[in-house]
Image (cartoon, grey):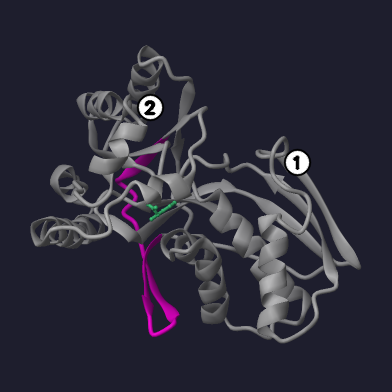
């Protein structure tokens, strides 16, 4: 399962981008729950029924009306947890796709996507993690409708990963229930522009196309260093720089020297008194893959 960056600025709860940084999970039928975790999250993720991979597996059994006997799960995690990089989407998919494969693949892809989006509460990360590439996803009449689009190779993606974790629930609770028509229109216009810019590889449009009024203005107070780091990214040549999902990671789109942007973002974060690192990641165009052994 790839890491994912949701929203890309204006596409709140709709857009997702799959990135080439992967978690792996091995599932075996088992009486009772047994979970092992290596890598990211090994020090704090649950290893019992509350583990998200286990909850995903259970959701498949429940959907099929079968009793859940338990599951043995071995995770190798490379996606940092609670940073806005889709670690929980990857975990839901590991359980859901893995259990479905164990049971002979009775559920189709759209059903798996719907189960994962229900678990997550929003479809953007899970759509990108399942399908790969740049995805647009929405709920419609109880199911998730999603499309995956290619991403131009001339745009490169820098991800700044602060050491501090963030709660997605808290970063969603901070948002207003309703927004003005002006703000809704502002974002609609930019999502359209963003998809056109990415279709054409037109980086010149990204500075405007990645603007947002629906979530980042409210979340900035959780991340007081964000403006400074985003400004440093732009000065170093980034076309746009936004919160990755609910944060605290940032995503910068760059046409050209991505390494220079990464260095500038790291320095600005450090000067703000926050530890972290920046990495240049390729886009994953494959999504979640599984094999039965
Ligand atoms: N669209 C979600 C949000 C993504 O911004 O809350 C969470 O990773």
- Residue 77 is situated, as x and y percent measured from the top left of the image, at 67, 44
Give the secondary structure at mark 1: strand
Q: Which residue is mark 2?
A: 262
Q: Tell me which residue sits at (16%, 62%) in the image.
A: 188
* Residue 110 drawn above or below residue 280: below
Q: Is residue 254 visible?
A: no
Q: Between 87 and 239, which is closer to the camera in this rendering?
A: 87
Extent of the magenta region: 134-159
Left or right: 104 in relation to 277 = right
Q: Residue 181, how many percent across, how many down?
A: 10, 62
Q: Quadrant of the N terminus?
A: bottom right
Residue at the spot 17% in from the left edge and 50% down from the top edge: 209
Q: Residue at x 69, y 44 (%)?
A: 45
Residue 156: image quadrant is top left
Q: Is residue 142 magenta?
A: yes
Describe the element under mark 2 as helix, strand or loop: helix
Between marks 1 and 2 in the image, the one whose residue lies nearer the viewer: 1
Label 2 crowd bin: few (<14), some (14–19), many (20+), radius 10 Å: many
Residue at mark 1:
38
Figure quadrant of the C terminus: bottom right
Disc 1: CA contacts within 10 A as few (<14), some (14-19) or many (>=20): few
Badges 1 and 2: C-beta atoms under 8 Å apart? no
What main secondary structure does the magenta stretch of the protein show? strand
């Amino acid at each position: 399962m790839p890491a994912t960056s949701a929203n890309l600025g204006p596409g709140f709860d709709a857009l997702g981008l799959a990135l080439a940084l992967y978690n792996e999970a091995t599932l075996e039928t088992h009486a009772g729950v047994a979970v092992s975790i290596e890598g990211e999250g090994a020090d704090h993720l649950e290893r019992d029924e509350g583990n998200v991979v286990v909850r995903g597996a259970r959701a498949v059994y429940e959907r099929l009306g079968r009793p859940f006997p338990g599951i043995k799960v071995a995770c190798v995690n490379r996606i940092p947890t609670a940073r806005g990089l889709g670690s929980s989407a990857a975990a839901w998919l590991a359980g859901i796709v893995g259990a479905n494969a164990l049971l002979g693949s009775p559920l189709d892809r759209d059903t798996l996507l719907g189960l994962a989006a229900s678990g997550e509460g929003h479809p953007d990360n899970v759509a990108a993690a399942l399908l790969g590439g740049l995805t647009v996803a929405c709920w419609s009449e109880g199911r998730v409708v999603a499309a995956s689009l290619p991403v131009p190779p001339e745009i490169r993606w820098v991800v700044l990963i602060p050491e501090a974790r963030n709660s997605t629930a808290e970063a969603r609770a901070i948002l207003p229930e309703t927004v003005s028509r002006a703000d809704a229109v502002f974002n609609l216009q930019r999502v359209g522009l963003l998809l056109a810019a990415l279709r054409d590889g037109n980086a010149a449009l990204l500075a405007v196309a990645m603007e947002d009024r629906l979530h980042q203005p409210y979340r900035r107070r959780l991340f007081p260093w964000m403006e400074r780091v985003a400004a440093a990214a732009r000065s170093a040549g980034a076309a746009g720089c936004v919160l990755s999902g609910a944060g605290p990671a940032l995503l910068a789109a760059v046409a050209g020297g991505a390494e220079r942007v990464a260095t500038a973002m790291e320095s600005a974060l450090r000067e703000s008194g926050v530890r972290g690192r920046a990495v240049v990641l390729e886009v994953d165009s494959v999504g979640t893959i599984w094999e039965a052994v």
